[in-house]
Image (cartoon, grey):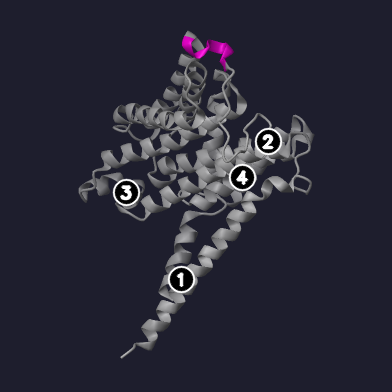
Amino acid sequence: MINIRDKGAEIWENSGKTGRVAIATLSIALVASLPFMGGTILNTPIASYESVLVYPIAMFVLMAIGLNIVIGKSGLLDLGYVAFFAIGAYTMGLLGTKTGLNTWEILPIGIAMSMFAGLVLGVPALKLRGDYLAIITLGFGEIVRIVALNLGALGRSEGIIGIPTPPPIFGVEFSFDSHRIYYWTLLIMILFAIWMVRRLSARRAGRAWESIRQDEDVAELLGVPTFRYKIWAFVLGASVGGAAGVIYASKTLFIAPDNFTLQISILILACVVFGGMGNIWGVILGAVVLGYLPDRIRFLSEARLLVFGLVLVIMMNLRPDGLLPRKKREKAIEKKEAK
């Protein structure tokens, strides 16, 4: 005998999945079409709208997703995230100019180098917590920049020039002015990063990170191998930063230590906090706003920094948990499930 209630629930669930897939597909199509909206109100007054979409917006979104694994998911304060961005970029710069490898061949190497750096940093640093961890990660970011500044093989203060662009994809050429193809490349990487984070969040790693973020001591008492999962968070977060660095270097064709200052780490951290730590959609929104706003108000010249700072101060006072707070989203999900 068919249970009508169960059958109805199954149909409702399937229709809900179909609706979510449709919404996701439309959203991706809309985001992919953004480069064609340069003549609208979205246009930036001075900088090229399409170039702003690539850097800082898309690049900030990708790095913010990576940093969110460390800060939002695991509750670990990392102030040196720009180090992994720099390692990926310098891997691309060095191998791209010294070997015959192309960008797509260097990309996994850059990711691997950044993951190794995350492991090297994480093993000693993650034995500490709070302010001590923040200071160590801050120091690591500066160490990487200073090494690049003084090492002859990395070009010292002059940096590395002549970095090659990626080879064509399906006949589409990459060049310094090919903003759209770079944007779509970053969009694919962002979608993959979102998929990875959501898959991990729904599994044992996500539950372990959540327990560490809530109370690490209690998590250890419950048998969670906290050190192992903190290392995983650092390594995975570093991989995303390294991937962003490789694409950044192949886009700009030139990198120098001044491109990887503490300010970048602070901006990416601000994207995570401003959007809503732990909520991947909030983090993406925060990165879009903080990446786009400074260029949108660039006509204000030096005053734009004051306006930008005031917006941050006002918003963080009105919404201290971010634009899309994680707790509210979780409550909404629980309420929906209860119905």
SS at mark 2? helix
Q: Which mark is residue 51?
A: 2
**Crowd band around label 3 with a 10 angstrom C-alpha radius: few (<14), some (14–19), many (20+):** some
Q: Which of marks 4 and 2 is in front?
A: 2
**Crowd band around label 1 with a 10 angstrom C-alpha radius: few (<14), some (14–19), many (20+):** few
Q: Position of residue 149 (x, y in %)?
A: 51, 13
Q: Which of marks 2 and 3 is in front?
A: 2
Circle 4 is placed at which residue position?
Answer: 288
Work out whether 140 lies above or below 65: above
- The answer to whether residue 57 shows anywhere in this view is no
Q: What residue appears at the point 45 percent right and 65 percent down from the top-left corner?
A: 333
N-terminal-most mark, 2 or 3: 2
Assign the magenta stretch its main secondary structure.
helix
For residue 118, what is the image quadrant? top left
- The answer to which of 302 and 122 lies nearer the viewer is 122
- The answer to whether residue 33 shows anywhere in this view is yes
In the rendered structure, which amino acid carries the disc numbered 3? Ala
Give how far apart the Cα atoms at labels 2 and 3 are: 36 Å
**Magenta stretch in the rendered image:** 153-160
**Crowd band around label 4 with a 10 angstrom C-alpha radius: few (<14), some (14–19), many (20+):** many
Circle 3 is placed at which residue position?
Answer: 205
In the rendered structure, which amino acid carries the disc numbered 2? Ser
Give how far apart the Cα atoms at labels 1 and 4 are: 28 Å
N-terminal-most mark, 1 or 2: 2
Tell me, yes or no, whether the highlighted magenta stretch contains residue 169: no
In the rendered structure, which amino acid carries the disc numbered 4? Val
N-terminal-most mark, 4 or 3: 3
Q: Are marks 4 and 2 in contact (CB under 8 Å)?
A: no
